[in-house]
Image (cartoon, grey):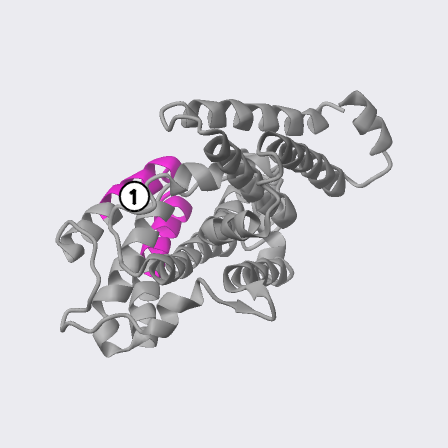
Amino acid sequence: MEAVNRRLSGVNFETRAVLKILAILLGLMALASIVSQGVFLQPGNLLNLVNQNAMLTIVALGQLLVIVTGGIDLSVGSILAISSVAIVLFQDYGLFPAFLVALGIALLFGLTNGFLVTYLRLPAFVVTLATLQIGSSIAKVLSGGGAVYTGYEGAGLPEGLTEFYKGSMSGIPNPLIICVLFLGVIALYLRTSTGHFTFPVGGNLRAAFLSGLPVKRVSMAVYMISAALCAVGGLLFVSRVGMGDPQTGTYLPLDSIAAVSIGGASLSGGVGTIAGTFIGVIILSVLNNIMNLLGVPPTLQPAIKGVVILLAVYLNSARKVN
């Protein structure tokens, strides 16, 4: 690692971090190819890898913005779950109105999180843990406790939606196109007047406030965006499995935080990159794929994932010492 640091000493801070994470990803992919005897690199397996993680990528982008400001959003799983349920239940009125209902519910949660954290100055961990529980309960009440497949009046999901997740455009899988689209959207947001101040606010809140930066507006915005992206994730989930599920998203808060952390973001705020977050998602997915290909028992997979996450975060944090 010291040799790598010396070679990258002339590269800027963020690029250096992303290159290190990319090196970890390439190493994992090489290992996956070896242990699977080439199965990992087969087009079908790589396509499945992309399809399975589009939802996590989009949610992790919202989590990145929150973490960069020094916050955390544990409610992403329940917001996605309630969004998926709302989309199916309100399908009688058409897909677009149903999504607008889901988006409205998600934004209400984002507004609540942002207000309690920003204006009442309650800890983000406690606030989003509470809204996680509230959202989960509401999703179960709306769905009757189980998965839902049709709307209130019996309307089913349009075939175009359920086929979208499996489809492609010019040979590029639709889920990958959606991921790239939202990667670009978040990159553009960070260039807006509000998004531009996300990093200074997270880096030093007091200095940002004294400098006259719109601290409250920035903090509110990241929770709202995180919630909105969860609604998009809910739509992708419905497209993929053809139902709304109040139980989905259980591990989404931890996986999204892990992806952002592996991707180089600091949980204390002020540091993080879009590219690093995307690579972090891929690292998690490759790790899961390796364990499945090797037939690792499900009871051992969380422990192995935890060790790799700790190792990746440790290697990434070494840049602060050098």
Helix, strand or loop: magenta stretch: helix
Three-letter amino acid code at the position of disc 1: Leu
Residue 200 colored in magenta in the image = no
- Per the rendered image, the range of residues in magenta is 107-134
Q: What element carries label 1?
A: helix
- Counting from the top left corner in percent of width and height, residue 259 is at 53, 39
Q: Is residue 138 above or below residue 291?
A: below
Query: In the image, is 122 to the left or to the right of 218?
Result: left
- Counting from the top left corner in percent of width and height, residue 223 is at 43, 52
- Counting from the top left corner in percent of width and height, residue 67 is at 51, 42
User: 77 and 319: which one is in front?
Assistant: 77
Q: In which quarter of the image is the C terminus?
A: top right
Toward the front, the furthest residue is: 37
Query: In the image, is 233 to the left or to the right of 92?
Result: right
Q: Quadrant of the N terminus?
A: top right
User: 145 and 155: which one is in front?
Assistant: 155
Q: In this view, does 82 lie above or below 73?
A: below
Q: Can residue 225 be seen in this view?
A: yes
The residue that appears at 54% across and 51% down in the rendered structure is 44
